[in-house]
Amino acid sequence: MASSPPFPKAQQLCTDFDSKAGAEAIAEAKEAKQSIDNLPGWPCVSLSDRASVEELLYRELYASDLETVAPRLWIMSTQSSANVGPLHRQRIKGREILVTEDPRLHLVWIHDRIFIKPIPKYLLSHHFWEHFLVCKPPVRGARQDLIQRAATGYLRSYRYLIQHESDFNIAKQDHLRLVPRHLEWPQFCRFISNFARIEDIDVSHRYHYGELRLSRLNFYAPFLFGKFHFQNLHGQYSDYFARFYGPILFAFAVASTLLSSMQVEMAVEQVSAGQGVVLCRFGLPIEN
């Protein structure tokens, strides 16, 4: 696993954690009514409490159920990390972009909707990566390696989601804010270009895949996850049972055909038997 952040410090997009962040970062923190010593967006999580930070990162970035079944995700998705349509393409497909904070739902789509997790501000900081994601042993643990791979794969997915300035403008819309609103296209473009060199070996197994179809995840949930569904949404039961309509109709058609064949055969036997009785009455021989 890489021992340094996936982007150079000169191209970081968040300086809040730098020792020389300056008065501007402090002023922004005060304006947001949180301490510079706390994780941005999480005023109750202190950066000095490493265990709490690690627990939050694991919960916010690592999709444990998808990671567990990742070797079998090829059943329901193209095995390519590049299988992610840019935001403008999602609009062309008629999909509504829905914000989710659940890492399990990032890049999961159903019908005319796709779920996308916004980029947390702290993942744009080189300093944060050095101290919490790529720190050296003995501080580093096995779970931290999982978090680092998941974080790298998650950020790499934005290389595909935002490929053009039009995608960037969609991401900054007020009802989405998939990226921090203070960012500009040139600086984000330089930042995200660093992830072009990231290989699958550097990311968690879930991010060896791109978009995942929710209807298929729900259909295979009893076999893969040991539960009735992966994620239940309003109106999804009709989609679930619709998967069985085809096989049921096929079985019904086969059964109907077999029964009809049996009825025809029985009718022929009855007619043949009737003809034999008539011939016997007239004293005519019956030929086999």
Image (cartoon, grey):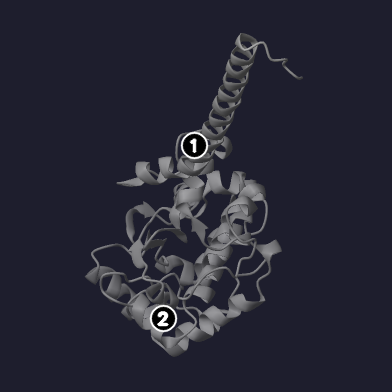
Q: Earlier in the sequence, mark 2 or mark 1?
A: 2
Amino acid type, label 2: Asp
Label 1 residue SS = helix
Quick one: 152 or 238, which is closer to the camera?
238
> What's the residue at 57%, 58% (across, down)?
150
Amino acid type, label 1: Ile
Label 2 residue SS = helix
- 179 shown above or below 262: below
Q: CA distance from mark 2 to mark 1?
A: 43 Å
> What's the residue at 53%, 30% (across, down)?
260
> What's the residue at 65%, 71% (across, down)?
198
Question: On residue 248, which mark appears?
Answer: 1
Quarter of the rendering occupied by the C terminus: top right
Farthest residue toward the bottom? Answer: 186
Residue under circle 2?
167
Residue 55 in picture, x, y percent from top left: 47, 47
Q: Is residue 114 visible?
A: yes
Quick one: 3 or 149, which is closer to the camera?
149
Q: Left of 148 or right of it: where is 230?
A: left
Residue 157 in picture, x, y percent from top left: 53, 68
Quarter of the rendering occupied by the N terminus: bottom right
Disc 2 vs disc 1: which is toward the camera?
1
